[in-house]
Every structure is written in C-alpha cells, then in structure tokens.
Image (cartoon, rainbow, N blue to C red):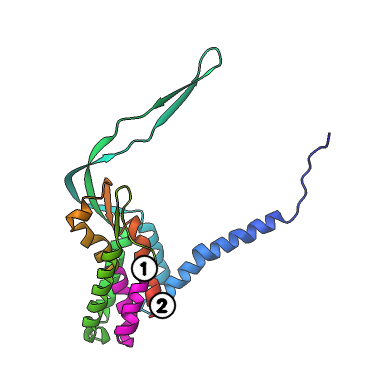
Amino acid sequence: MNTPYFQFSGGILGALLFLAALFFLLVFLPMSIVAEAFSRLGLTTFQGVLMFLAIVVGRSVNIPVYTSQRLVMVRRPRIVTCTMDRAGHASCLDEEPANELKKQVFAVNVGGFVLPLLLSLTFVLGTAQGAAAEGWGWIGFALVVVAAGCYAITRPHPLTGLRVPLFMPALMTFLSVYFFVPEPIRPLAAYVAGTMGTILGGNLAPLLTPRIRNRIATPLVSIGGAGTFGGVLVAGVLAVLLA
C-alpha cells in the first residue's frame, strides 16, 4: 500500500501571483482608471479614489421614495427538511411555502443615481463661469442623444427589473460627444451625458411608460440599481477617458 505524500511544487507562489493579479485587475486598475477620469473633471487622485469607493459601496444602498398600490408576487424558495427516525432512516419533507403579495416599492440607488447626480451638478456648477456656460446646449444635446438611445435598448425583465446592455451607453456617449461636442467641454459633456443620460433613458423614462413599468414584477424597483449601475459607471468613466 502506497502512502500518500505531499511535495511542494510552487503552488503557494502561483496562488500568491494569482491573487496579486486579481488585485491588480479588480481593484488597482479600476481605481486608477476612475481616478484618471475624475482628474480630467477637476478632482484630485485621492478624491477620485474616494469617490470610486463611495460609488461602489453605495451600490448596495437603496433609498425608498415611493410605495405603489400595485401588488406583486414575492416567490418563496422551496424548503427541504431532512430528519432521522429512530431506526436510522432518513426522512425528507419537501415544503413549498405560499407566495406572498407585497406592494411594489420604488427607490433610488446611492451609488448608481444619487452620487452620479451630485457629481454631475458639482462639475457643471463648478465650471459654470467657463467653457461649460457656453456649451450647455451641447451638453444637453449629448444628454438627449444618450437618453433616447438607452430608452430604445432598455428591456424590462419581470424578475430583475430594467436591464441596460453594459457597454452600449458608453459607446453612444462617446459617439455623440466625440463627433458633435467642442473639444474643451468633451470630458464634462461625456460624464454628464453618460451618467444622467443612462439614468434618464434607462430608468426614469421607462418607469414613466405604463406598458414598460407594468411588466416589472419585482418588489423593489431601484433607479440606478443592479440593472443599470454598470452602464452608468462604465459610461461615465470610459466616455470621459475617450473624449
């Protein structure tokens, strides 16, 4: 009978390198990209990193703003309970709890709506005496283009809410800003149009459309939440860098 043995073959070093690569790809690189994008809008590197962390953490925070009278069904998971009888035989009971009806709640997401809105207002008001004051028409034009495009591609899902393709808002923002907006205000226009255009066209406008809103059966509808958070973040950051 052969006795099993263990031999070190560099596995620990490989695991450490893998963790370092994950840290670089998932933490350091996104922070660097966001900090660079925000630096073009007037923030320092520290402020950019801090804002990125606040947006990521705020993604999990929803502030309820309205409770509808519409009732939606909340599905309960099946429960399987297994016990042992005195003879040592397993006995399993499969229970399927009754579904529950709840009023539909509408909320705003801190990381996907509140913070991008505050940042957009801060950037616009902070440069109101400069080039932005002359280019508000171009910023509004890019905002309308992105909002209309997002409204056209947004799809309601009964169980997950409104869904926006991840990179489409960024692509529409880049095209509308790069080819139409004057160069001095492109970064500002890209951020405002990319974030607010995605929210307006991907969340607010569909929710104001009854035929779309009535197809959403989730108990919590979050504006700027899971379905559009990625599109808002990618559009705002990537469009600024490309502009």
Can you tell which quarter of the image residue 206 is in?
A: bottom left
Q: Position of residue 82 (x, y in %)?
A: 48, 24
Choose between 115 and 140: the one closer to the eye: 140
Residue 144 visible in the picture: yes
Which residue: 36% across, 71% down?
170
Residue that label 2 marks: 241
Q: Quadrant of the C terminus?
A: bottom left
Residue that label 1 marks: 168
Q: Position of residue 230 (x, y in %)?
A: 38, 62
Q: Is residue 5 left or right of residue 120?
A: right
Q: Residue furthest left?
A: 69
Can you tell which quarter of the image residue 101 is in?
A: top left
Q: Which residues are magenta?
A: 168-196
N-terminal-most mark, 2 or 1: 1
Secondary element under disc 1, as helix, strand or loop, is helix
Tell me the amino acid under the disc marked 2.
Leu
Tell me the amino acid under the disc marked 1.
Met
| Magenta-colored segment: predominant secondary structure | helix
Q: Nearer the viewer, mark 2 or mark 1?
A: 1
Mark 1 neighbour density, 10 Å: few (under 14) some (14–19) many (20 or more): some
Which residue: 32% across, 80% down?
177
Choose between 37 and 92: the one closer to the eye: 92
